[in-house]
Image (cartoon, rainbow, N blue to C red):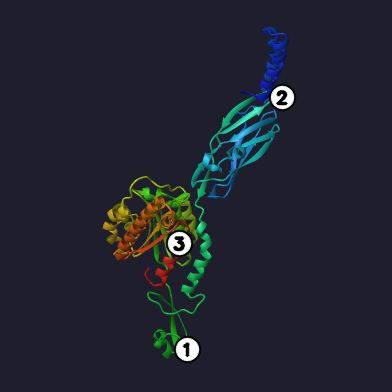
Amino acid sequence: MALTGRAALLAALGSLPVGIWEPSWTGILAVNAPLALACACDFALAAPVRRLGLTRSGDTSVRLGDTADVTLTITNPTRRPLRARLRDAWPPSSWQPGTETTASRHRLTVPPGERRRITTRLRPTRRGDREADRITIRSYGPLGLFARQGTHQAPWTVRVLPPFTSRKHLPSKLARLRELDGRTSVLTRGEGTEFDSLREYVPGDDTRSIDWRATARQTAVAVRTWRPERDRHILLVLDTGRTSAGRVGDAPRLDASMDAALLLAALASRAGDRVDLLAYDRRVRALVQGRTAGDVLPSLVNAMATLEPELVETDARGLTATALRTSPRRSLIVLLTTLDAAPIEEGLLPVLAQLTQRHTVLLASVADPHIADMATARGNVDAVYEAAAAAHAQSERHRTAEQLRRHGVTVVDATPDDLAPALADAYLALKAAGRL
């Protein structure tokens, strides 16, 4: 039950003349008794809240930054019309800051025996699952003096997926892939490529590509054409330890790593390679294996949606052992982790040989663009000290990257906006060189 502001206003207005002309309990009772009777009648005429039927429908997933519409159907099985205000409660991160009140509150009128639909529009600000909370309904009588109030549960979950902002780079990378694959240029011999087909020799072709046996069987000179290897295995390893929780700009490093992994997965699946995902810190947080080319990207996006950085030190030995079990054959292992000196030197380097002796390893790390800005700062004492600290941090990262390169690891160190295309370029370079 709830007393409305209208009833309180009428009580105050009725008590005002009594207090001025006839201040007595009798006067107050003469004013408030009819009002109390009107409130009781209004309450009796309000539609019961607990007998209402509520069901949900609508979107079950949405990309971060987009909107999702969840429809709530209210059925009134009673003989009284429902005049109500409704609050559809969701977690605070389901809306942009400051928009929750207007987005979650609704007015509706449902005649007896009918149903009405209302739509709650969500615009989440964080990845993960957003679960609907209680639905609070306040049913008013015809006078608007008194209201019945109750809550209902109508479970619904909207999964907020990674935004995949780097997909804008996919067309240009696919064009480069087509060039490597020989679809837009004449196929030529390259290191580590696979035989594709025979064609007639034209002036300018590499004479080393002439197939003399095929030439002997026909009147024209035949040359072999080649294409990059296909059906290679790629394992994307996301480090979800404490270093992935560090924020670069407005988002954690893990989000930039996910975006880069999605672009690489989309590109590799188009190239005919098989892509798996492993998310690990001290245990397996997500594992995607054996998906087809058409299903790999939705599977990765769905697995990444609920991943959050864990504030623990990543177990490099456990990560290496799990990666080796996941990839028993020669593969390209892409480690999306940090280039900070301590985690690399104390954790990864001692076990790196186990990976490099069996697999091709590519390490991608998110660099902070603010450090580059600090390194160029001048003008006062504080700026000079900041520049010195930034230069020292950059020197440490370069030294760590060189250590990894000496162990045969390809290193990509780029800012969040540049990491995804840089990682895709590194993959294409390895593919062109036949190192997958």
Q: Which residue is mark 1?
A: 203
Q: Residue furthest front?
A: 380
Q: Which residue is mark 2?
A: 143
For the residue pair 376 and 214, the one nearer the viewer reads as 376
Residue in the picture at 68% in, 30% down: 82
User: Does residue 338 show up?
Assistant: no
Amino acid type, callout 3: Leu
Q: Position of residue 146 (x, y in %)?
A: 66, 23
Asked whether, in this view, residue 325 is left or right of residue 9, the answer is left
Amino acid type, callout 1: Pro
Q: CA distance from mark 2 to mark 3?
A: 63 Å
Question: Badge 2: how crowded within 10 Å, few (<14), some, or many (20+)?
Answer: some
Amino acid type, callout 2: Leu
Question: Badge 1: how crowded within 10 Å, few (<14), some, or many (20+)?
Answer: few
What secondary structure is found at the residue carrying circle 2?
A: loop
Q: Which mark, residue 253?
A: none
Quarter where residue 326 is shown: bottom left
Q: Position of residue 285 (x, y in %)?
A: 39, 49
Quarter where residue 71 is shown: top right
Q: Considering only order in the chain, which callout, 1 or 3, is on the residue closer to the N terminus?
A: 1
Q: Which residue is mark 3?
A: 264
Q: CA distance from mark 2 to mark 1?
A: 95 Å
Q: CA distance from mark 3 to mark 1?
A: 37 Å
Q: Considering only order in the chain, which callout, 1 or 2, is on the residue closer to the N terminus?
A: 2
User: Does residue 108 show up?
Assistant: yes
Q: Position of residue 152 (x, y in %)?
A: 57, 32
For the residue pair 351 and 218, the one nearer the viewer reads as 351
Q: In which quadrant will I find the N terminus?
A: top right
